[in-house]
Amino acid sequence: MFLGRVIGNVQATRKDDRLGGVKLLIVQPAPLEDKDTHLPVVAADRIGAGIGEDVIVAFGRAARLAMGDENLPIEAAILAIVDGTEVRSDAKLKRGLGNEKER
Amino acid sequence: MFLGRVIGNVQATRKDDRLGGVKLLIVQPAPLEDKDTHLPVVAADRIGAGIGEDVIVAFGRAARLAMGDENLPIEAAILAIVDGTEVRSDAKLKRGLGNEKER
Amino acid sequence: MFLGRVIGNVQATRKDDRLGGVKLLIVQPAPLEDKDTHLPVVAADRIGAGIGEDVIVAFGRAARLAMGDENLPIEAAILAIVDGTEVRSDAKLKRGLGNEKER
Amino acid sequence: MFLGRVIGNVQATRKDDRLGGVKLLIVQPAPLEDKDTHLPVVAADRIGAGIGEDVIVAFGRAARLAMGDENLPIEAAILAIVDGTEVRSDAKLKRGLGNEKER
Amino acid sequence: MFLGRVIGNVQATRKDDRLGGVKLLIVQPAPLEDKDTHLPVVAADRIGAGIGEDVIVAFGRAARLAMGDENLPIEAAILAIVDGTEVRSDAKLKRGLGNEKER
C-alpha cells in the first residue's frame, strides 16, 4: 500500500460495463522527499474520498477485496482516508541499507 | 490502474495461439510532470481504443477480467477510454509525505 | 521482499471495516546507496514492529498470509524485524550485468 | 506487458528441477526515449525467440499461462516475437497528464 | 525474473513462525549499465546460493512454487544460480522503442 493525495478524477463513458458505478480518482503518490517521479495512480473508491484528501491505496486482489467484488476489473482502490501521519524524522535512513555490518 | 495515451500498435505473427484475435496497443503512461522515464506498456484492448486516445490501463487479473477471459496470457488491458480528467493543481503535493507531523 | 525502516504510522478513521484492528506502519525502503527515490510503503504489522526498527516487508498474497487472513484487503505486511544484516561490500556489483561474457 | 529486445541468455545448472527444459533469455526493455534505467528481465521462452529479436513479455500468471504450465516457478515469459511496431510520434504526450483540465 | 548478485544475508529472530527455517538473502539487481538505483531484494533460498554468486530471482506465486510451499509468506525466491550469461552487446537497443516505424 502507499500514501497519496487525491488530486482529480476521470470521466470515461466508453468502458468495461462492470465499471459503470465505480468512482475513479487520480491519486498522486506521496514521496519521502520533494522529488516525485512516480506515476499518478487511478484508484477506485467506495470510501467516499474527495479531492485534496490523503488516502491509502492498495493494488491487486486487495483492491478488489476493498471494493467488495473480486471480479471487478480494477487493480487499485482506496482503502482509507488518512486523518494524519506521524513520521519520526530522526528514524529516517541517512544512508543506504540500514544497520549494515560490512566486512 | 494508470492513465496513458495510445501511441501505437504492435504486429506479431509468431505468438501464443490464444493471442490470435487480440489487439495489442502501445500505451505511454501519463506522468504528473514533464519528465517521463516510464516504460511504454503493451495493453490488450477490446474497448475499441485508437491511436491518440487517452485510456485507463489495468494490470494482472484485472486485465484478464477486462478481456473476458481469465486464461488469456496477457497482463495489461485497456479498461476505459478517457473523455476527460479534472485535476486540481492546488491539491497537488508540494513536498514529500503530505500532512506529515514530525516530532 | 525488501528491507526498510519503520519511520512512522498512519491514523485513519474512515476506512474499510476489515482494517479495524490492523496496525499500519510507514516503511522507508533501504537502498544500497545514499540516493533514495523510492516511495515509502504502508505495511500492515502483527509482529509488533516499532518506529526506528528495520524490517522485511512482503507484498501481495504473501502479505495476507503473513497477517493470517487471506481476505484482508491489504497488499503489504511486515514479515520480520531485522536483528542485523551482513553485507559483503566486495561482493557488490561494480558494473552492469554481472559476469557478462560479451562477444 | 512490455516491449523489449532479446540481448542474451543465461546458463544455470544449479536450479529448480522444474526449470530443466526451460529456455531463459535476457530481455532489455524498450523505453520511449534514449535513457534506459530499467532492469533487464529474465524471461522464459517457448515461442522460439532469438538474440536480437524484439518481443512482448508478460509477467505473473500470464507468463505461466504462456508457458502452458501454471505450476512452473517462473514469472516472466515471452508472448510474441514482434514483426514491427507503428508509433505515431505526434500522438506522444508532450507534457504530464494528458488533456488535463485544471481549475 | 531478474538477474542479481547475492551480497549478504539477514538475521531476524522476531518473525512470522513459518519463516523459521527459511534462509533469507540480500540480492542486488544487475542493471545493464553502471548506474544502479534499484532496491536490493530480500529473497528466500533453498537452492544453496552463497554470497558473491549470481542468481535468478522470481517474485510472487512463482517464488512460493520455487520454495515448494504455496502458503509460505514470502514473495521473492532464488530460482537458479547462474553459471554464466551471454550478452550480445551489438544487440542492445541504442535508442528508444526498437524498430519503430514513425509516421
Image (cartoon, coloured by chain):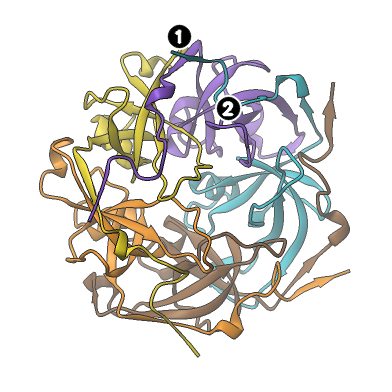
Chain colours: A brown, B orange, C cyan, D yellow, E purple
The residue lying furthest to the front in this view is E103
Q: Quadrant of residue A70?
A: bottom left
The percent coordinates of residue C43 (x first, y second) are 64, 55
Judge if badges 2 and 1 mark residues of a common chain: no
Label 1 environment density (alpha carbons within 10 Å; few <14, some 14–19, many ≥20): some
Q: Image quarter for residue E92?
A: top left
Judging from the image, what secondary structure is the residue with disc 2 in? loop
Give the structural element (helix, strand or loop) at label 1: loop
The residue to which callout 1 is attached is: D13
**Residue D88 location, x and y as percent?**
26, 59
Q: Nearer the viewer, residue C75 or A26?
A: A26
Question: Above or below — where is E4 with respect to B33?
Answer: above
Relative height, residue A4 to residue B41 (above, below): below
Q: Nearer the viewer, residue E16 or B27?
A: B27
In space, the residues marked 2 and 1 are separated at their CA atoms by: 22 Å
Q: Quadrant of the N terminus of chain C?
A: top right
Residue positioned 41% across, 20% down in the render:
E88
Residue flagged by tag 1: what amino acid is it?
A: Thr
- In the rendered structure, the answer to whether residue C27 lies left or right of residue D30 reads right
**In this orientation, does residue C88 appear?**
no
Q: In this view of the protein, which residue sits in the foreground, C96 or A18? A: C96
The residue positioned 43% from the left and 29% from the top of the image is: E65
Disc 2: which residue: C96
Q: Chain of mark 1?
A: D
- Nearer to us in this view, E97 or A10: E97
Residue drawn at (74%, 39%) of the image: C33
Q: Amino acid at mark 2?
A: Gly
